[in-house]
Image (cartoon, rainbow, N blue to C red):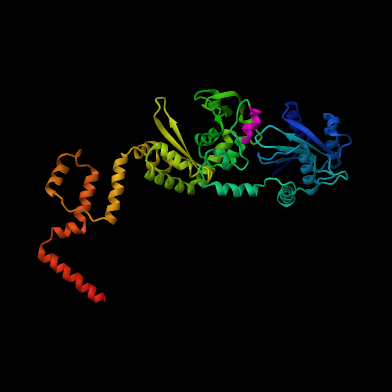
Amino acid sequence: MVTRINKSSSIKVSLNYNEQKVKQDVAELIAAENYFKDAQLLNFREKLFMLEHQAKLNERVKANSVHISLSFDPEEKLTKEKLQGIAKSYMDQIGFGNQPYLVYQHDDAGHPHMHIVTTNITVEGKRIDMNNIGRTLSEKARKSIDKEFKLISPESKKLIRQLQQKETIQNESRLNPVSLRKVQYSESQTKAAIQNVVDYVMNQYKYTSLGEYNAVLKLYNVMADPGQKGSLMHEKKGLVYRVLDEAGNKIGTPIKASQFYNKPTLKNLEVKFKQNEVLRERFGLRIKNQIDLAIFRKNTLENLSNSLRSEGISVIARHSNDGSIYGMTFIDHQNKCVFNGSDLGRQYSAKAIQERCTINPEVVKQQRQLLSQKFNEPIKNNIDFKRDISLSEKDDGIFDKHQRFELLEKLLSREAKQENMPDELQEEQRLKRTKKKRLHL
């Protein structure tokens, strides 16, 4: 279970938020504790009156509205009765058991969750102290409830993710702590589903541009759209969020960034761009090492992508109209950071990587064999120096770089040196080696 507690100065706004969800058939009022009627018999005015009346008992407190959300793992199968029990146990343990509160079960995201609306003013007119309530009472209550109701805890999910890091990542959503699923336009309420994805990506990943930010969002069929260049929205630095279909096409009605509660506007994102430039810097080396290793082992673009995916790194290629690749973005899901290839260095740009991945596999194979021979096998000495040198000067097409490297190895080998040495010098060196051995003995 994951808990979140928010305070505000308007009980009506918090209540309206949940009541609107009820009208949209994506939420249900499942409990009204310490009210004079059952939940099903209360109208909106009665729900609001009870909370506002109690809050007015201490008008010196401005932030008198408390809005709590309790979220659960997507794999949890929770009945209404179990949710009611969890809500009551939680409110008792954080000191709100005697307060009037309303419990709403929501079904507007990829995981089960519920919202609780209450006030922090008691019937005696005293204010319930909420300083550090999340760290002290709420966290203790969460752990107790996870154990009491046999829930999947964040700690157990973290352990599972650690064990899965070395496995092939077939779906990037496995890396997310709340198992964010891809947004499907006709599947759930669009705004809530987009909010779920944006909230996680915006706060967890380290990106330095709108393009890098979108590279992660698009993994979940979401896009932050600044509008076309020259448009009024683009000039005013506006931003809307869109749902994408599986082909990457925009569908549905765009939603303004300002309409989301965490305000993922371009202005706020630009602040994060600057912060992330420093935060992501130390993680670039891991990506570069993994790219180098992948290219050395498997030197095609397809194999490169698959190899990096097994290490938790997604490769996003950007194509021009003619289908050619003009850019590459690397998303490290382990360290939650995003890099354009050119930001990692020249040899990691799209052009350089394509060149590195199109080397003739036979040449790579020959180079590996040559290195193996250097350490494990004697090199043959039947070299026709005049012929080889003349070829290197006349015809680079016949005498390639690999052959030159092989020739150099042979020229510098111990056997080649001895073969071209006069007999007297060979004998003299043999005596010196024998003398040295005797001295060591």
Image quadrant in which you'd find residue 25: top right
Main structural element of the magenta stretch: helix, strand or loop?
helix
**273 horizontally vs 97: left or right:** left
Residue 79 pos. (x, y %) = 75, 37
Residue 200 pos. (x, y %) = 60, 39
- Indicate yes or no whether the magenta region holds residue 190: yes
Residue 221 pos. (x, y %) = 56, 31
Image quadrant in which you'd find residue 297: top left
**389 horizontally vs 142: left or right:** left
Residue 435 pos. (x, y %) = 20, 74
Q: Can I make out residue 65 in this image?
A: no
Q: Residue at x 17, y 53 (%)?
A: 381
Q: Give the quarter of the figure containing the C terminus.
A: bottom left
- Indicate yes or no whether the magenta region holds residue 324: no
**306 horizontally vs 120: left or right:** left
Image quadrant in which you'd find residue 342: top left
> What stretch of residues is rendered in magenta?
187-196
The total of numbered circles placed on residues is: 0
Q: Can I make out residue 387 in this image?
A: yes
Q: Give the quarter of the figure containing the N terminus.
A: top right
Q: Nearer the viewer, residue 27 or 224?
A: 27
**353 horizontally vs 42: left or right:** left
Q: Residue at x 19, y 39 (%)?
A: 398
Q: Nearer the viewer, residue 229 or 287?
A: 287
